[in-house]
Structures are given as C-alpha cells and as structure tokens.
Amino acid sequence: KQLGCVNLKSNTLRWLQSRYESVVVAFILNEYTPYGMALHCFDSFLRQSKGKKLFDKCGIILFDNGSFNYEDDAKKVLGGGRKLFERDHLSIFSSRQQLTTPKVHAAIKAMCQNPSSVIFLTRMTTRFDLVQSVCLLPKMALNFCMECGSFYDASSCPCSGADNPIIFSVTSLPVEPSSFGGIGTSTMETTCYVSDNFDEGGLKVQITALVKGNRRIKGADNVIVRIHSERLTGNVFYSKKCDCGEQKHKFMQLMEMEKIGVLVYIKGHEGRGAGLYNKIKAYEILDTESSKNHIDALSDVGCQSDIREYNAAARFLKYTLEIKSLRLFSNNLQKFEAVKKLFGSYGSRQSMPTIPGEYNEKYLQEKVSLCGHDGLLE
C-alpha cells in the first residue's frame, strides 16, 4: 500500500502496525522548559501509552533543542526522563543551537534507523496527548488518533468532538453576589449544569458549571470563562497555602459585572488528581522538610505531579454551550492548550495575577518555575 492511495480518516491501527516496523516518541526540550511541566509530559505519556501494543517496544528520544542557557535545568529534565523510562532504547541528543521546527523534524527523522518509522512529537512545554500528538510519517506530517486509530489533518479528530457529548442535568440557580465578595446587592441569575461522573485522564471526574446569560450563550463572542479545579482547602476553608479560593472569587466578581460568563468547576481534581488525603500527606512532608518543593512531596507520597486533563471541559464549552469565542481567565497553560484545540484563534487567555502572602509565597513561586504558570505573580 502507498500512503497516498488510502483514506487517511478511515485508516486502522492494524494497518499502521503492519506497515511500520518501529515507533519512536520524541520529546523536545525547548529553550526554557519548566522541570515540573516536563515531568507532567513524561507522566502523561507513560499513562496514555500503557497497554497499547503500538508502544510496547517503542524508542524514546529526548531532544534538547539548544537550551544550553539553562544547562543545569536541561540536565535535570533529561535525568528525570532517563530515570522514568528505564529502557535500553532511550536516546538523548542535544543541539548546539536552536533549530526551526522543520529542521527539528528533519534531525529527528535522521536519528531513526528505520526511514519509515512512525514518529510522535511533543514539546515538553505541553502535556503529551496521543489523540492530538503530531505524527511524522515519510514525506508528511499528520495527526493520529489512538482512540479510533485514524490519521487526520484537521484541528481535532472527528471522534473527539460533537459525536461524543457529555449529558448534563440543568436548572436555574440564583446566587448571592456578597457570598463571593461581589460588589452588588441584587441576586445574580445563573444556570447550573451538572454532569454525571465520568473517566478522564485516569480520574473519576464531574463537571459543574455556572452560566450567566444562558439564553444568549449560543454563538456568543468573547465570553469570559474560567476552568477551575476542585480544591476543598482553598474553596471551602479559604486556606492561605494556595491561591485557588482567591482566583475563584475574583472571577465570580467579573461574572457579576458581565452580561455573559461561565465558571466550569471540575470535581475530582483535588490535589492535581492526587486526592485530598494524599495532598494533606504532601503538606505534612512540606511542614517538616522545608527544602522540598510540592512536586517532590507529591512524589514522596506515591503520586504523580499532575494528572488532570481539561478536554471534557473544553468540549462542554464548544459543543454543549456552543460558544463562538472566549477569553479564558487562567495562568495554567495546560487549560489553555485544551481550549485552543477546539477554539483555535477564537480562544484567548487572560492571566490572573496574585500577590504572594506569608503562607503561599514559596508555593506560588514553584507554580511559576516548576509548572510554567504564566502571569501568576505580580
């Protein structure tokens, strides 16, 4: 078979495995890749590829694309990858200068002994996603969906879109602005959407959303949106160890002033997916070992640094509410990546800066330096 003679959108995984003898996954270390974000990328690959025969004997390439201004950080990231993968077919390459994307693709192709290898590429500033990963094939670059086993060249695979809607219960829900520090005195009318529990990223999650202006939301432009993860300590107990409660309050104050707005709350994301018990165990470690960071503490209690995903939240905004364009209020670039997959240029991001306090300064600095949160610190 020749690649140009097949229907790419109906191509099966069996056809792929019969044609190609080897699979390579290449992780690209950019000029500045936060250590925590790189670990997220490695963790997500290991989790998503588990049990898939295609990746049983795949090669791993860690490609340092000219990051020598941050040599110590690069060594730490590459050392972490070597420790995680623990396989003979792990190769590490470094470029003395930053290469353009086409040159990176050409260099990685040249490293593969089999010229017809399937090569999955991912930048280590984003979470590895098998459904949306760029796939290099001989003479062309296409996306390959591990869910339905098809190639595609559109912005997202057809199987991940409107054909798989999440079912919601819906009711009107008036809320009191003063309860979240609002400046008004009247009740704010919202519509509440609640899903049943479902699996995403290895977690059992549930989406709840407050929508202001629900009757005008379909086809609306420039809608303010926040995707907010569950955090009992911050959202209910107003803990000063994090900024989560403050971020939620700030956004709901913005909703009060706008005609249309959406707050998406994801239950099941407590402790970045570690759960409340393990999060408090990690807090306990940090209480006694101040030299450790929060990622190390989560690792000490047997948890990955972050296993949350936001694709379902983005699909809710796109296919359930049918928003045309939005402004995402978030410092978390992973949330924005999920939105961009479906909204493209119709999605923008606005940071939510926070002034560090006595109890959260170290944690907020780690969110910036280790996890790549952008615009967090004033």
Image (tube, grey):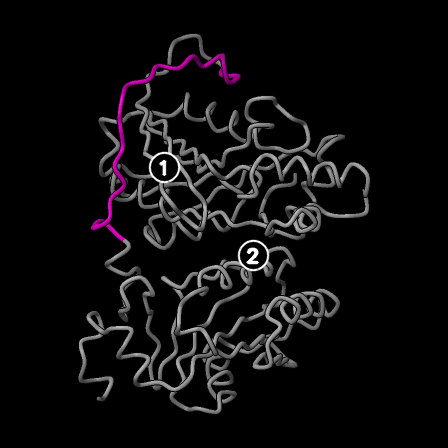
| Image position of 363 with respect to 13: above or below | above
Q: CA distance from mark 1 to mark 2?
A: 24 Å
Asked whether 165 falls inside the magenta stretch, the response is yes
Residue 143: x and y in percent read 33, 69
| Image position of 107 with respect to 154: above or below | below
Query: Disc 1 marks which amino acid?
Result: Asn
209 and 214: which one is in front? 209
Residue drawn at x 66%, y 81% is 96
Residue drawn at x 45%, y 26% is 254
Residue 281: x and y in percent read 68, 38
Please tell me the numbered disc located at residue 197. 1
Residue 330: x and y in percent read 50, 41
332 and 69: which one is in front? 332
Q: Which residue is mark 2?
A: 40
Label count reads: 2
Residue drawn at x 60%, y 21% is 237
Q: The magenta stretch spans which residues?
A: 161-182
Residue 100: x and y in percent read 51, 77
243 and 77: which one is in front? 77
Asked whether 120 falls inside the magenta stretch, the response is no
- Labels 1, 2: front one: 1
Tell me the crowding category of disc 1: few under 14, some 14 to 19, or many 20 or more residues within 10 angstroms, Cα based. some
Residue drawn at x 81%, y 39% is 288
User: Which quarter of the figure is the C terminus placed in?
Assistant: top right
